[in-house]
Amino acid sequence: MNCIFCQIAGKEKPAKIYFEDDNLIVFSDILPRATLHLLLCPKKHYATLLDIPDDILMNLMERARIISRELKIEDNFRLVLNNGAKSGQIIEHFHFHFMSNAPHLSAGIKNQSGR
């Protein structure tokens, strides 16, 4: 498949991975728009919000809450979804942008995989 996010999930392309389990992968955006800019994606390919199963969607939302608590930014992050090309979705693989400009993040974050 030519989907870059599927290739990252399949370890065919490199990425700075923050979190990964059997169903989800969270990695740094290569063109960050904030001090912290992560992409929260299902590993399986779903193009839009209308395609993703409810359980995977809820796992992504829970992961966003966990990340906000881990980084102590519970009140200082935004979760962005561009659904479809007309909304600005560039990669046709469902994903959330998790972003924060919290001052204590300026020193950078350590990803859990060591990459």
Image (cartoon, grey):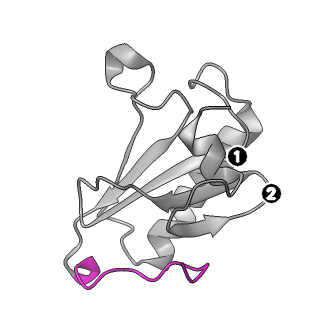
Residue drawn where x is 45% and y is 67% of the image: 68
**Disc 2 packing (10 Å; few <14; some 14–19; many ≥20):** few
Query: What amino acid type should be assigned to the residue bearing mark 1?
Result: Lys
Q: Residue at x 65, y 42 (%)?
A: 6
Asked if residue 27 lies left or right of residue 86, the reply is right
Q: Nearer the viewer, residue 61 or 29?
A: 29
Which three-letter amino acid code belongs to the residue tagged 2?
A: Asp
Residue at the far top in the pictured view: 86
Magenta span of residues: 104-115
Distance between mark 1 and mark 2 Cα atoms: 8 Å
The tally of labels here is: 2
Q: Earlier in the sequence, mark 1 or mark 2?
A: 2
Residue at x-position 55% and y-position 61%? 14
Image disc number at residue 22: 2
Q: Position of residue 69 (x, y in %)?
A: 48, 73
Where does residue 28 sit, x and y in percent of width and height? 43, 61
Does the magenta-highlighted stretch encompass residue 112?
yes
Which structural element holds mark 2?
loop
- What residue appears at the point 22 percent right and 66 percent down from the top-left corner? 101
To which quarter of the image does residue 56 belong? top right
Is the magenta region chiefly helix, strand or loop?
loop
Q: Please state, as top left, top right, bottom left or bottom right, where the N terminus lies in the image.
A: top right
The residue closer to the viewer here, 37 or 8, is: 8
> Is the Cβ of the residue at disc 1 closer than 8 Å to that at disc 2?
yes
Q: Nearer the viewer, residue 7 or 104?
A: 7
Q: Residues within 10 Å of mark 1 (few under 14, many from 20)?
A: many
Q: Secondary structure at mark 1?
A: loop
Relative to 105, 43 lies left or right: right
Number of the label disc, if any, that sits on residue 43: 1
Q: Is residue 114 magenta?
A: yes
In the displayed structure, 32 sits above or below 107; it is above
